[in-house]
């Protein structure tokens, strides 16, 4: 880490806050993934990590590196865009596989709550 | 011109992305341009119809609304996971959509996935019905109205 010890206190607090918020949300998503009961409930939990969890960690990174003037913020923006664009693909793949399984097992997924 | 550059915006965007991710140099400019042109040609093979012009203003408004919704539903779902949500009931909602444009549908899927608490499961092209799973379902009708008025209306405006 280069020159992080010279980070102004106000900025450091903001960055730390964002990091804690982001990782807490991601952790909660992971906890939900383990603890929720039905499959369709569990697919909701990780979206905490892929939405605000990721966004606030990326924001923290943007703050630090634009202060350090090491490079532009473009990397974080690109990571964010790719995360948003690719998550639905996986979600639909897994979700439709589950639908297919419950339908071929003869149960309408609509009844399962 | 159009044969060599079927998707000018896509190619330009890719070139800019390439230059931003690497350090700017003449070599990268050439390499990035080649890749951008190639990708544009490949994309033209995949999707013959060049998308119609979109209105930008409704999309910007939609982006603002979605940003707020993502924060709100993050808090809501985080709280439900923490409090163990004894009274919470999740369930499926079938939502008839008026959207036809594949780009608009993709955008709606993106929005619903990025907002915790809703999961896009299946969309039937023929009937236009979307099967959505909602984490905290109180009233299915509420969700139909919300998606129709809050997101779909703006998307129709932008892609119409």
Image (tube, coloured by chain):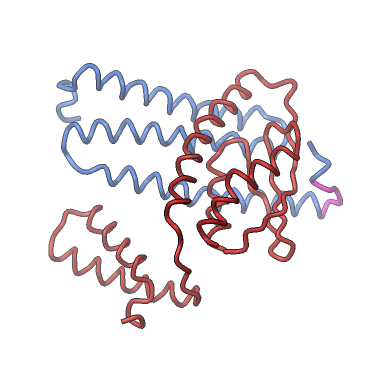
Q: Main SS of the magenta segment?
A: loop
Q: Position of residue A75 (x, y in %)?
A: 29, 46
Residue at horizontal 19%, vertical 65%? B29
Q: Position of residue B17 (x, y in %)?
A: 29, 57
Say if the magenta span includes residue A76. Answer: no
Q: Position of residue A14 (x, y in %)?
A: 31, 22
| In the image, residue A38 above or below residue A80 | above
| Quadrant in which the C terminus of chain B appears | bottom right
Give B59 or B30, whichever is nearer the viewer. Answer: B59
| In the image, residue A23 above or below residue B122 | above
Residue A42, quarter of the rendered image: top right
Residue at horizontal 32%, vertical 30%? A60
Rendered shade, chain A: blue
Give B52 or B26, whichever is nearer the viewer. Answer: B52
Residue A23, quarter of the rendered image: top left
Rendered shade, chain B: red
Q: Residue furthest left?
A: B26
Q: Please give left or right for residue A65 compared with residue B111 in the image.
A: left
Residue at horizontal 47%, vertical 24%? A24
Give the magenta part as a residue range. Answer: A104-109
| In the image, residue A36 above or below residue B91 | above
């Amino acid at each position: 880490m280069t020159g992080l010890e010279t980070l102004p206190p106000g900025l450091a607090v903001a960055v730390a806050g964002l990091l804690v918020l982001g990782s807490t949300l991601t952790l909660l998503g992971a906890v939900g993934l383990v603890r929720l009961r039905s499959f369709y409930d569990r697919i909701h939990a990780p979206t905490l990590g892929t939405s605000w969890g990721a966004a606030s960690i990326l924001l923290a990174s943007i703050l630090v590196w634009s202060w350090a003037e090491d490079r532009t913020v473009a990397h974080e923006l690109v990571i964010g865009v790719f995360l948003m664009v690719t998550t639905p693909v996986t979600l639909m793949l897994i979700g439709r596989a589950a639908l297919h399984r419950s339908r071929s097992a003869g149960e309408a997924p609509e009844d399962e709550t | 011109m159009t044969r060599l550059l079927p998707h000018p915006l896509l190619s330009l965007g890719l070139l800019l992305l390439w230059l931003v991710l690497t350090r700017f140099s003449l070599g990268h400019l050439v390499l990035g341009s080649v890749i951008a042109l190639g990708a544009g040609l490949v994309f033209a093979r995949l999707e013959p119809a060049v998308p119609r012009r979109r209105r930008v203003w409704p999309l910007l408004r939609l982006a603002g609304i979605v940003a707020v919704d993502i924060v709100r539903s993050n808090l809501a779902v985080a709280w439900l996971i923490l409090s163990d949500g004894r009274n919470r009931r999740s369930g499926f909602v079938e939502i008839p959509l008026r959207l036809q444009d594949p780009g608009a549908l993709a955008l709606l899927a993106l929005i619903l996935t990025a907002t915790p608490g809703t999961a896009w499961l299946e969309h039937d092209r023929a009937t236009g019905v979307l099967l959505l799973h909602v984490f905290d379902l109180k009233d299915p009708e509420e969700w139909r109205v919300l998606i129709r008025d809050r997101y779909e209306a703006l998307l129709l405006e932008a892609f119409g």
